[in-house]
Amino acid sequence: MRLSSSAVRLIIPAASLAVLLAAVFYMQPRAMSYTGLNLLFNLAVPIALATIAQMLIMSVNDLDLSMGAFVSFCACVAATFLQTSPAIGVLIFLGAIAVYAGIGVVIHLRQLPSIVVTLGMSFVWGGLAVLLLPSPGGAAPGWVRWLMTVKPPLVPMAIVASVIIAAVTHYVVMRSSFGVLIRGVGGNNRSVERAGWSVVGIRAAAYALAGLFAVLAGIALVGLTTAADANIALRYTLLSIAGVILGGGEFVGGRVSPIGAVIGALTLTLAGSFLSFMRISPDWQIGAQGAILIVVLALRLFLNRVEKREKNR
Amino acid sequence: ETADKKIALSNNYAGNSWRQAMLTSWDKITKDAVSQGIVAAADPFTTAENQATEQAAQIQNLILQGYDAIVINAASPTALNGAVKEACDAGIVVVSFDGIVTEPCAWRIAVDFKAMGESQIEYLAEKMPDGGNLLEIRGLAGVSVDDEIHAGIQAGVEKHPQFKIAGSVNGDWAQDVAQRAVAGILPSLPEIKAVVTQGGDGYGAAQAFAAADRPIPTIVMGNREDELRWWKEQKDANGYETMSVSIAPGVSTLAFWVAQQILDGQDVKKELVVPFLRIDQDNLEANLETTEAGGVANVEYSLEDAQKVIDAAM
Amino acid sequence: MTALTAKPWVWSFAAAILVWVITVLFTGGSSSVGLSQATLTFAAFSVIVGIGQMFVITLGPGNIDLSVPATMTLSGTLALKVMDVQDSMIALGLLIAILVGVAIGIGNYALIKLLRIPPIIATLSMSFIVQSCAIWTNRGLRIKPPETLSDFTTSYSFGVPNVALVALVLSLAAWFLLEKTTYGRWISAIGQSSFAARMAGIPVDGTRFITYVLCAVLAAVAGYLLASFSGGAALNMGAEYLLMSIAVVVIGGTAVAGGNSNVPGIWGASLFMFLVVSMLNTYGFGAGVRLILTGLIIIAVILAAGGRRVAR
Amino acid sequence: MNDRVPKQEVVAARDVKVAFGAVKALDGATLVIQSGECVGLVGHNGAGKSTIVNVINGGLTPQEGAITYGGASADQGITAARASGVRCVFQELSLCPNLTIAENARVMLSDLKGAGWRRRGLALVTRQLAEIFPGHSIDCESVVEDLTIAERQMVEIAISFAAVDARPKLVILDEPTSSLDAGLAAQLMAYVRRFVETGGSVLLISHILGEILSTSDRIVVMKDGKVVADRPAVDFNTRRLVETMGSVVREQGWQRSARTKTGAPVLSVPPLPGASIRLEAFSGEIIGLAGLGGHGQTEALLDLYLAANGNWWPAAEPKMAFVAGDRGLNGTFSLWSILKNLSISSLKGLSNRSVIDTDREKKVSESWRKRIEIRTPDMHNPILSLSGGNQQKVLFARALATTAKIVLMDDPMRGVDVGTKQEVYEILRAEAASGRTFIWYSTEMDEIRLCDRVYVFRDGAIAAELVGDDITEAGVLAASFAGGEAA
Ligand SMILES: Nc1ncnc2c1ncn2[C@@H]1O[C@H](COP(=O)(O)OP(=O)(O)OP(=O)(O)O)[C@@H](O)[C@H]1O
Ligand SMILES: Nc1ncnc2c1ncn2[C@@H]1O[C@H](COP(=O)(O)OP(=O)(O)OP(=O)(O)O)[C@@H](O)[C@H]1O
Ligand SMILES: [Mg+2]
Ligand SMILES: [Mg+2]
């Protein structure tokens, strides 16, 4: 059997997730239930959305260091304006998405390193969030809260949402023409340009779409936590990058996988739980988080090896 | 009877001496409690980074693990409400302290941070009735404790208009950050009579004043041993006067006992208040003596202490 | 003039000077000496960690060291613990700090090379482990530095802070390494294309390994100095320097895509980063506005400096 | 030939001037292409061929002169060019490696859209590939990065010729055969003829003059940014073409070294399992690696090189140097000057205890510049300011400047003009005479014939060894195909 490289990119993260899940079930059989799964995974939903956003940026060979600050900002907007005057909230979100597109344009036109621009933007979003919510508070709009806590039959919301996110983004990024162009820019932006496309437009669109997913991440997060604060999601910057990598994406070359990214986000969330089931001395709890990241990624290497042997046969 | 009950500590941060002292106190008191068979387990859990989302996930895991009570020092008063609600729904007792949560189903062991801020100005007003310029060192922007202490300080300044906040910086409760920020603003400031702080940054401020060759103002301290020791040195050398105030890390043990009492079926009010730990000119030496080198001035609570606090609130 | 504006580091210096002038204007000039000294002092720490980070970033896309803060914490904690306030132990303390750096560098590269973990995640994981080690060794207790060391780090020679002089010496060494030695050529070549570098006969793994070790050692030295400077190691003392080390490198004009680096820019950017916060504090902006302006100013500097560069 | 179709002007670039700083890449060049003709474009490296291609393609706006599409003065730019049916296969491969073949077709053909584009694109490319390269073995569902260089080039060519709604009017091929072996190149040339005979036009750029002469209707010769000749192909033969380009035709005074297999081998590699011939090399030999493209020659060179050069510690005495053929991918360092690019492999000799002696570096590189005539006013100019052929010379100099006894060459003459090639051959001969060993993979038969000894590769292993007068096109071809037995 010959596996396509995109299929391989998926097998590895999926296998890591399965192994980790098996370990968690083994240690805590109670997790193997509707509520158990929901508790394990519901906080993965906003992370998955942020990971998708980061993945879109990475698919055009850029990196967004402002992801965490931006999701925090969106969470603050969702907990304030979106709740009190939805129209203004939506307008702010549209504006933020437009700013994202604008960042894409500036980065492209001035040939700037995305890392620096987004580093600068992370201060800006952080400042806006602090202005919006100088101390934690706000409240999730009712419909958001409902959406994030609804209990569909058979499968918990966290799983349903993850599947929907994966399916939609897989279609957009891997199947649609638009996705092809975005990944094309990541793979060889010169050839896309020479074929007559506007690369700046494509990049702007990729950034805007990333902005949209980050906005969704902020809203979903507030739905889960019921309120926001200015620092609520700062960790999402690194988490989202780690999620993309765990999911088989690469920093350059437009090699990304949306399904993998969602799986990566789930894996990261699960890794945290796995640890708290292990009862480690507090001194080493932080270190264990590092160790588990290492183990999960080493697993990736191991499966890669196995897969290579397969392919060579 | 709580011999078969399990209590967990969910802690959002371990990266400073205050938190380490808090964990040590927890360890000391709960180990005894477990060995005496008062509770079955009292496990501490710490997240890697000071993030509400990570702590929310941690709480959800603790629910899954079947703890009977969760004691929380929260990263955010509101962002954990979703997870706390789920814990309550699962029949788990949730007690929050220091960083409290606003979810109504949880118990709160609160420190009146606003009063803590205000007390600094009260002290200064008494000491220097003429007032003067103040430098305010704030904590981490966007965090409620920072906002509350700041509000207290502002209220104090309004009440005593002879004081004026001439400069304000964010020290993120980290002494090197505070030192850096103060050093940057100091050259542009007029004469400063006093520095109001939020804890953990007083020594950094003193260093910055010394480095800039400026007269050392009255710096309100935050109960850290190095601050107290520096104060003592100054006091011995030139009679330096100030005060020190902070919340005692041992409050985690109070939270533990409160959780135990609730599990035991006692009627406990949802809102409990603990006094902050204040050190003054006269009890400086005594406190310095009991404070571990490099640590934080501390008070640990016994079951009886806790019962007193609970009864007082009734 | 055009030759000057073509140098990417010019912009960070221009920005630093501009911000300095604006800050000093607030007091009508009387704060100029004090501000300059404070700036040099604190920029020195950013410079030291920035240089290490610059070497790593030069290695090409994806290369970054996120374990800098944890390394600073562990080296500071351990060194101060070993020195135990005794002046006679200062050299041993420094040695310990350097060894900590070496060990962490080796660990980082082992993860990157043996387990093929992307550097950003490898060093992040490593930083968690290192942070745990720091907690474990001392549980966050602050031990004071030896008197002499503490005096040295907080005092001045010829009006210049001693730590700035240390940073200057290290910068000169880094500049020499980068511009004049084969090692400098090698990392630049690897940054442009590691495969081409391999085919040109460069020992790619060896060079990358040394670079990660170098970065960790510089972070460790910075941690040692910072702990001595601020009167003891704190568990969170490196936190500031995660974003800072990256920011000073990129604002200073080093190409993030690798292969192109410069030392003077790190100085410009370090001075700038300190001065921006001081300026905004001086003018009394609140935290929110201050953050927003910091971000916008960084972007403005990049816009002014960027676009003239050849490659992304 | 095709008198029935009235000739129409497809594109015309008149009196075009393009300057990059002081370099006049185009200095008043005129190129008009009619429908139904194949125009051959030749010229030395840096003559301005690729530049005029970029002008026609709309990617570069000339400082002076006019571009018209279809006879009418209309819009300019890439979009206008594409709308007028101009397609271009660039010299450096320009597919997106991370996309599948069908997705690349989507990127390159903007009218491939609407529901089912994936399926239609796949069918289109499959059909086109079969038409141009009958018998090829490309899996059309693969991702481009899984293909060999030759296969990528084939795919790019096929996509460029493919017709979604309207078929292309003009296809520009900038050195399309540089990574194709002779068989594939012949198939392509045959297809170009068919395409032209049905009314399409082709602009063909190549340094392989045989191709140009046999395929073009008209040949345009460029020199230093100017068109120096524009005449029907029948007016030219190889000799006249080379003379018009300005190179002196040298006689093939090549003496095979008599020293074949003398002394102890400097290199000896046991055969792969399943093969029987050892790869050996002796001092002073020029060894050719031949066979069809993509049969493991490059891999063999890489294996040799990587095994000899440590990755952890700098070698005290480098054993081998490598000249890359795919210079964009593994040759040049694009941020650097020519000087740094040249000296990178020989820094050890140019430094004292790792400190580089810049004067010595400058002197040595200056001497190489003279010796192999790198066309640049200043070695401190960026490497990218050189034309492709001159960049290739820098890579040669880089390898030759080392002290390595063995030089591995991975089809290094790709896209090097005839004159330059002759110069390089001579340098090779001189170096070999002084005891260096060259192991040379080449896709060009002419170059294989220059070698002292040849290993023919088939399916990743050595299938035959040819020595001396046995090295003939027929011999190599016979050994290249399964079942064929060499002498
Ligand atoms: N961007 C540029 N900057 C500076 N010089 C350039 C640039 N592009 C092309 N040149 C120069 O313009 C001249 C013409 O280059 P061009 O690439 O058109 O030559 P060519 O005929 O394609 O050569 P080759 O046969 O090597 O492909 C060369 O001297 C080249 O160095
Ligand atoms: N806009 C540009 N900016 C910078 N460099 C350029 C630009 N355009 C072309 N060049 C460079 O100028 C050189 C000459 O261009 P060109 O691509 O035409 O050579 P080439 O056709 O590849 O040469 P050869 O045929 O010898 O292989 C190339 O190396 C190219 O990269
Ligand atoms: Mg060309
Ligand atoms: Mg060419």
Image: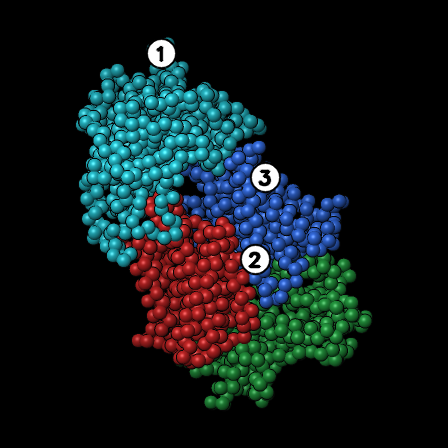
Chain colours: A blue, B green, C red, D cyan
The residue pinned by badge 3 equals: A170
Disc 3 to disc 2, C-alpha distance:
31 Å
Instruction: Output the chain of dot 1.
Output: D
- Tell me whether marks 1 and 2 sit on the same chain: no
Q: Is residue D383 above or below residue B233?
A: above
Q: Please, what secondary structure does the residue beneath circle 3 have? A: helix
Amino acid type, mark 3? His
Res. D206 mark: none
Q: Position of residue D418 (x, y in %)?
A: 25, 29
Does mark 1 have its CB less than 8 Å from ligand 4?
Answer: no
- Tell me whether marks 1 and 3 sit on the same chain: no
Q: Viewer-nearest of labels 1 and 3?
A: 3
Res. D2 mark: 1
Q: Is residue C50 above or below residue D398?
A: below
Instruction: Output the chain of dot 2.
Output: A
- Tell me whether marks 3 and 2 sit on the same chain: yes
Q: Is residue C225 visible?
A: no
Q: Position of residue B3 (x, y in %)?
A: 78, 70
Q: Please, what secondary structure does the residue beneath circle 2 have? A: helix
Q: Viewer-nearest of labels 3 and 2?
A: 2
Q: Please, what secondary structure does the residue beneath circle 1 have? A: loop
Q: Nearer the viewer, residue A64 or C36?
A: A64
> Sequence order check: which comes first, mark 3 or mark 2?
3
Amino acid type, mark 1? Asn
The residue pinned by badge 2 equals: A291
Q: Is residue A170 visible?
A: yes
